[in-house]
Amino acid sequence: MTETGNICTLYTEFRIDDDSINNPVDNPVDNPVDNPVDDPVDNLGSNFQSLPGGTSGPGPGFHGSHESRHDMSLAQLHAAPDLVDRVYGSLMAAISRGDLAPGHRLTQEELAEKLAVSRQPVLQALRLLKKDGFVVDAPAKSGAAGGARGLMVAPLDGVMIARLYQVRSVLDGLAARLAAGARAIVPEDLMRRSRAAAAGDDVGTLIDADAQFHDFIYAASGNPLIAESAGRHWQHIRRAMGAVLQSTGARGAVWDEHEAIAAAIACGDAARAERLAREHCEAAGANLAIRIDDYTAAAP
């Protein structure tokens, strides 16, 4: 269905029963890091990639001599991603994939060695991860000198995820309402690839497809603040979805719900689109929170 008229015809003749949407489906602090200690980091996984390069001394053009004081010319700098940001991104990706699992102990030395960088950018990245709630203080190890605790990957929290989905449901409902005002058409190719992802075994592809669907609606809303606000929570949600879907292989009728939302948007039914989008998120959040509790209880 690529034309609005065809979608609206099907939408009118085969209107999905609202009750079928109401059942939950499978969808997927601020303190500095003090005295990090050497707790072992084991099995980071083959997907944990090193960053090229590392830190170095003064670059070309710095001579450290008396003559340099009189040479006011400066060598041109080539733009490069900030090393702290790159370390943060690499660690965040490893946490989201599960390579760094909940409860996994972290140390600067081990992480710096794996990423082929110095300890300083790792320290800064860990501070940011702790501030964002992905890293927490670890319990003291028995026999550790001075009661030093170190850091670990934060446990999954079903209550927090449920609260995040409460916020997301409002944002998604607003986005769907605004997109319906524009009678936006979700690309057929996106829906087809999403269906294929749901039928496959690659959890990462499934989560990416879910994100692409919602990102399209955010963009179609015409309000960039919706995507910006939702993006603040996405890494927490993605991490929870990845852990739960990998452990349970959970699948559901999520794409039936997505198609119902897409049909309401295409036909300009703003009220229905908003309601379906909110119910979709609320059900997904409640279901995910339950599965997180089960996952946590079953963890060794």
Image: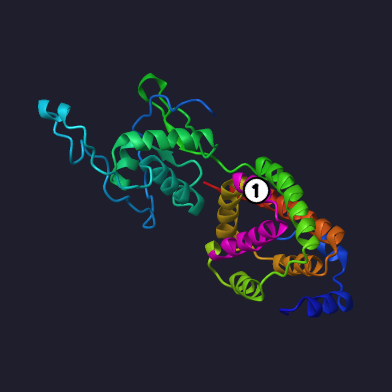
Tell me if residue 93 comes above or below residue 136 in the rendering: below
Instruction: Give how far across and how far down residue 85 sits, in percent.
Output: 42, 43
Q: Give the secondary structure at mark 1.
A: helix
Left or right? Give the position of 289 relative to 73.
Answer: right
Instruction: Give how far across and how far down residue 20 sits, in percent.
Output: 83, 65
Most extreme residue toward the top is 146
Residue at x-position 29% and y-position 51%: 52
List the residue tagged with mark 1. Answer: 230
Tell me if residue 278 comes above or below residue 112 in the rendering: below
Residue range of the region highlighted in magenta in the rendering? 205-232
- Closer to the camera, 41 or 32? 32
| SS assignment for the magenta stretch, majority | helix
Q: Is residue 82 magenta?
A: no
Q: Quadrant of residue 118?
A: top left
Q: Quadrant of residue 82?
A: top left
Looking at numbered disc 1 in the image, what kind of residue is underneath it? Ala
Residue at x-position 77% and y-position 63%: 182
